[in-house]
Image: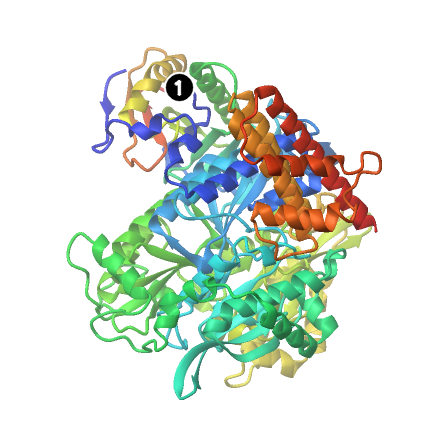
Amino acid sequence: MTAITLPRDAGASDPSARAKTWKQRLNQEIPPSIAREIELYETQMELKRRGKIEDKVFAESRLRRGAYGQRYDNGQRQDGVSSQTLEYPSGDLTKGPNTLWDAPGMHRIKIPFGEVTAPQLETLAELAEEYADGICHVTTRQDVQLHFVHIDDTPDLMRRLAAVGITTREACGNVVRNVTGCPLAGVCHNEAFDVTPYAKALTTFLLGHPDAQDFGRKFKISFSGCADEPCGLGRMHDIGLIAKRQEVDGELRNGFTVFVGGGLGAVPHEAKRFSDFLPAEELLPTTQAICRVFARLGEKRNRARARIKFLIAKLGIDEFLRLVHEEREVLPEDPRWTSLLPEALERPRFELVLPEEGPVGPFAEVYEAWRRQRDGPATEAAPFPDGPYPEGFAAWAKSNVRPQRQNGYHTVVLHLPLGDLTAPQMRRLADLARQYAGGVARTTVEQNMLLRWISGGDLIELYRGLREVRLARPGAGTLIDVTSCPGTDTCKLGISSSRGLASELSRRLAERSFELDEAVQQLRIKISGCFNSCGQHHVADIGFYGVSRKSGNHRVPHFQVVLGGQWSENASAYGLPAVAVPSKNVPAALIYLTDFYVAERERGESFQEFIQRIGRREVRAKLLDLTRMPTFDEDRTFYSDWGDAREYTLADMGVGECAGEVVSAVDFGLAESESTAFEAQIALDAGRIDEAVRGAYTAMVQAAGALTRGELPNLSNDPQEIVRQFKLRFHDTARFHDPFAGAKFANYLFRAHNTGGESLAPDAAHRRIEEAQLFIEAAHACNTRLSQN
Amino acid sequence: MDAYRLSLKLYFEHGASPELTPYIAVFHRWIREHTLDHLLIDVADYSLVPEGPGIMLIGHEGHYSIDATDGLPGLVYAHKRPQDGSFAERLLASWQRLSTAARLLEQEDSLAAAPRLARDRLAFRINDRLLAPNTTDTLAAVDPDLRSLLREIYGDAEVELEHESDPRACFGVQVRTALA
């Protein structure tokens, strides 16, 4: 054993590294409210381990923090021959209905409007290496997902994200999901104005907002800078906000054309126009009013019809508008409606063309960060470089580089295969973002990443840097840039292997990309593993979604070919299925379709127009040969899916968690009160008597508040008011009374409330905690009685 | 050293890049036949990701991958879940899992070209920045147990250790020896 070569920068350890837990290490770096939120989650995990929280309540609780189930998490897996039981060490312990504790899960990390900074990129890389499988996956809604994460690791994962300003709160579940936004905001030639500050404000406003906690289903919001491009996909969202400038009282003002009730899923709905011009200052209150109407009137029991699109279809857009306006009128004034938008509202006149001295408006900050982070003087704007170019540069630049509206700056797309990149690639991307792009990158709805503010003079060096880590893949935004949901790889709802098919198509198309006709190169392919359209197949030129067909005693993975979708104009038209083709014939079907288009299209005819002219029946007839399946004995390869050697089966499908669990706000509030009571017990065990007494009282107030808010949604957090309203509505009406004990449990609350912050002896504190537990149980019982009535 | 997220890698001989797709079937069969002595769950296909984890065999306690994340193809075992025993025992257990999988792959008839994994090089990482930051202190802390493992593997052969340089990366050491 001889030489040890040390790196130059490997020195003594950081003293904070001596902390034994991430909680200790990051204690000072996480905002207290977020730290508390994560501790609450950890307490709920402990309560779940002890069997003190219902499966569905805990499931919704973890989902709302981004912790999702994955395929096989019921402990059963079809191995191609038979179904095997996965014998996890925690046995029957569950983390949700039919979901085993030890089963690896997916963690969804919200990246609002896709903006991610260099330190955040580095943290994502760390988490992928330490807790997942080393891969960061960019989703079609600008999130980042980690797969194969154990639930025990999730609190630390959240802490490390919180320390760099990311929360996973409300990444899943029946809440407002990641607010997406055009990744070109601020640098696009076509936009009315930069939507970034508005997206940021709405994200902040709605996160944890009481009016957005009691939905029957998830709720998705998107911002676009213009009406023509697809970058924001505004018209396929629950709320789609498209920037618009309009003269109001002689002044040109920022506002939004608002669409509501759009959505893909099994039954896609085209969005309805809610407002042609919603002034910017009305953005937050109007969205709040929409949330209230959805929470109040949206379907709660039948999850298949619980999205807002069904409510709007049921009411009609005019009645929906009336209800929202009515709700808007009675909303209590909230100073945050304007305080969260200072930057945007104080600058009503954004410059459409930036002055030569550099960017202004919201991006001045990014620009300044970019200037500061460089070692020397900032690189000045420069035109696209002259040659000679390094190998591959010209093809890469043609597809992946676009000039910004600011002369001399460019956007650069990192074309990620199926949205995946490794932890080392992510770290290197952070370096390159710091060096060339102001320390900021954006994720895109096409599962790519984008660097902005790249000076023309830096393009060649950036290309070299990306190429070193294999991130200079050409073909962004072309036919080979295939989008796919996770499908059967990890999703419980997956029917066919969308990622397997996407891999195969990407490989084959990349091999022949240089011979593909220019018109074909511009087409978009999007693939979903089932009809739910997470891969956005409805809005692709050529979409596919997974189905299955039977042949003899065997099943054959298939994909429906979806044609006629429109990606442009914010995804304004949805395609329809033409025919189901066996998975193994899909590459041939694709080649047939593209060759057919090249041969038969008329001058300037888009693919959508081409399909319209030719007719779906004709296209279907042309593909009919490819729908035939060989028998199992003739060719067994048709009976397994792409990227999966097992014989195909549907046995592994489970109940998806996309829909979340329908858990009422009352149930949530009661779960929170139980966590607080549990922490009071821990405080008592540790001898922190006063803290235990306070905790017991707080737990009772929380439970009373939860129950009362079921009838009085605007109830404040003031304990005085909560107890007063609780007494009025539940005690004085005897509705809280126990059938046998009468007002006994309510009196526990009143006594604790009236004695205020008194100090108690340990045995009295113990009794107080017991009383709190009994009060919470009584609140549960009361809630059950009320629900049954 | 309390860390348990230990990762070990053997490299394919002569830096040969294997065709990845056939490993999917091999790993599925290992799951079906309980080939390894711990719970195996699934196979993940990352073959499209350049310099990525290739094909992964996902286990409850740890994952295997036909990995090229550091630019060189090889076989990785990365332990994920807490385990009993001293650090030396945990290190040895991870090595035994890797060497078992390596031996099985080298004997795998279903692969057209059975892989050859070089035994003169080894990469060791601890995927835990809290308990094992990439510092000289960590190197000093793991050194005796790592040496003990290397003696187990290489006997008295001369071994060269190189501490990986990026302080943001997980703690890592490259091990080289002249003898196989």
Point out the residue furthest to the left here.
A376
Point out the residue furthest to the front here.
A754
Quarter of the figure that contains the N terminus of chain A:
top left
Please, is residue A545 above or below residue A125 in the view? below
Asked whether residue A237 is in view, the answer is no
Q: At 46% from the left edge and 31% from the top edge, which residue is drawn?
A: B76
Q: In this view, does A763 lie to the left or right of A231?
A: right
Q: Where is residue B147 in the image (x, y as percent from the top left)?
A: 34, 15
Please, is residue A139 above or below residue A40 in the view? below
Please, is residue A690 above or below residue A575 in the view? above
- Between A281 and B18, the residue placed more toward the observer is A281
Point out the residue furthest to the top here.
B156
> Quarter-wise, where is residue A338 in the image?
bottom left
Q: Position of residue A540 (x, y in %)?
A: 57, 68
Give the labeled residue for mark 1.
Answer: B1
Q: In this view, does A71 lie to the left or right of B55?
A: right
Q: Where is residue A770 in the image (x, y as percent from the top left)?
A: 67, 27
> Quarter-wise, where is residue A588 in the image?
bottom right
- Between A170 and A186, the residue placed more toward the observer is A170
Q: At 40% from the left edge and 42% from the top edge, which residue is drawn?
A: A163
- Tell me the kind of residue under disc 1: Met
Asked whether residue A601 is in view, the answer is yes
- Between A45 and B27, the residue placed more toward the observer is A45
Chain holding disc 1: B
